[in-house]
Image (cartoon, grey):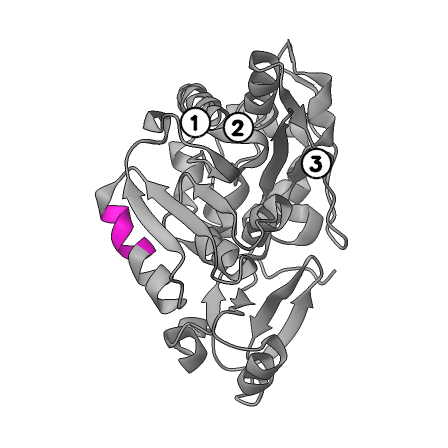
């Protein structure tokens, strides 16, 4: 793996002592710091609703862009150009043939694996990268309820759904914990989180991070997965994901779900070509349900992407 380019101001950025202490316990601190302060590779997902993967790829490469296959997603490519960085100005982007999406962000829909004609809930959908990915996976059939709880976020969600040519998506506005007595085949809970896996995309995370925030977020995340599981059909499956690498927001939330619902069964998951790190089974004196070992923990240094966490849970019959 080629070493990424470090940000020019990386030497001036200071991490809080408690943050350094915490992450020194969780991972290789120096590697985590290096990748967190390095530029994130640009990546795109080719939208199969609007065109053929190879044809779209060929058209973009004819303009001087270099596309490299993302191992775990056949529609995903890292993209670069010797003179340009403005991927969003590509004609194919404007007409919905591609979606600018981070490589690790493509993983949760692939793990959920929604099928044509299923009824799917994307509980925290905006701005729509995973919603539109799932819509394409479902071949624009069935129904996706794309929900978010902030009205101002629905504008980007609606634009991206429309641009992607999807007609199988219905947008809703409510807090995720207010869904009652619905029955979905599949549910994605890509929860609001601290974003500690995505520092390289948002450096402000370093300044706003604090333990109190993590505790508050974990409480909200537990509410979301609790309600999502209640809205699954018998035999249905849900994916819980975050771009956080905090154990309380990841393994801790999944452990809560498994211990709250006897009919919650964790599903073993693996994606060919994706490098992962073993889950955190115990942290800060708290032992998590041992079944969390079947979740996916991805550090930025594992694949030179954002850090991500993904778990798949089934409601047993």
Splitting the image into 4 quarters, where does residue 137 fall?
A: bottom right
Q: At 45% across and 26% down in the image, what residue appears?
A: 221
Residue 18 in the image: state x and y as whole percent: 52, 23
In the image, residue 128 above or below residue 70: above
The residue tagged 3 is: 28
Q: At 37% across and 60% down in the image, what residue appears?
A: 161
Residue 196 in the image: state x and y as whole percent: 51, 37
Point out the tag, 3 or 2, that comes first from the N-terminus. 2
Nearer to us: label 1 or label 3: 1
Determine if the magenta segment contains residue 156. Answer: yes
* Total tally of numbered discs in the picture: 3
Q: Residues within 10 Å of mark 1 (few under 14, many from 20)?
A: many
Q: Assign the magenta stretch its main secondary structure.
A: helix
For the question of whether residue 90 can be seen, the reply is: yes
- Element type at mark 2: helix
What span is colored magenta in the figure? 152-157
Q: At 43% across and 19% down in the image, what residue appears?
A: 219
Q: Nearer the viewer, residue 281 or 212?
A: 281
The residue tagged 2 is: 19
């Amino acid at each position: 793996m080629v070493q990424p380019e470090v940000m020019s101001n990386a030497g001036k950025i200071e991490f809080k002592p408690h943050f350094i202490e915490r992450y020194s316990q969780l991972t290789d601190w120096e590697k985590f710091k290096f990748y967190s302060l390095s530029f994130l590779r640009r990546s795109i997902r080719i939208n199969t609703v609007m065109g053929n993967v190879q044809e779209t790829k060929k058209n973009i490469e004819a303009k001087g862009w270099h596309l490299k296959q993302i191992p775990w997603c056949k529609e995903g490519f890292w993209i670069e150009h010797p003179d340009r960085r403005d991927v969003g100005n590509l004609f194919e982007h404007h007409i919905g043939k591609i979606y600018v999406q981070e490589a690790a962000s493509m993983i949760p829909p692939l793990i959920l694996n929604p099928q044509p004609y299923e009824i799917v809930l994307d509980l925290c959908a905006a701005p729509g990268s995973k919603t539109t990915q799932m819509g394409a996976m479902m071949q624009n059939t069935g129904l996706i309820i794309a929900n978010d709880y902030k009205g101002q976020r629905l504008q980007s969600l609606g634009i991206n759904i429309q641009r992607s040519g999807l007609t199988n998506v219905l947008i809703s506005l409510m807090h995720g914990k207010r869904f009652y007595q619905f029955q979905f085949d599949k549910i994605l809970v890509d929860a609001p989180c601290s974003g500690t896996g995505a520092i390289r995309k948002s450096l402000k995370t370093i300044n706003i991070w604090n333990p109190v925030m993590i505790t508050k977020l974990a409480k909200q995340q537990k509410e979301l997965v609790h309600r999502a599981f209640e809205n699954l059909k018998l035999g249905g499956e849900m994916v819980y994901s975050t771009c956080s690498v905090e154990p309380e927001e990841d393994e801790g939330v999944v452990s809560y779900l498994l211990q709250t619902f006897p009919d919650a069964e964790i599903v073993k998951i693996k994606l060919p070509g994706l490098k992962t790190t073993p889950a955190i089974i115990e942290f800060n004196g708290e032992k998590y349900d041992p079944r969390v070992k079947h979740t996916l923990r991805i550090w930025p240094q594992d694949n030179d992407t954002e850090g991500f966490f993904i778990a798949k849970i089934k409601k047993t019959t």
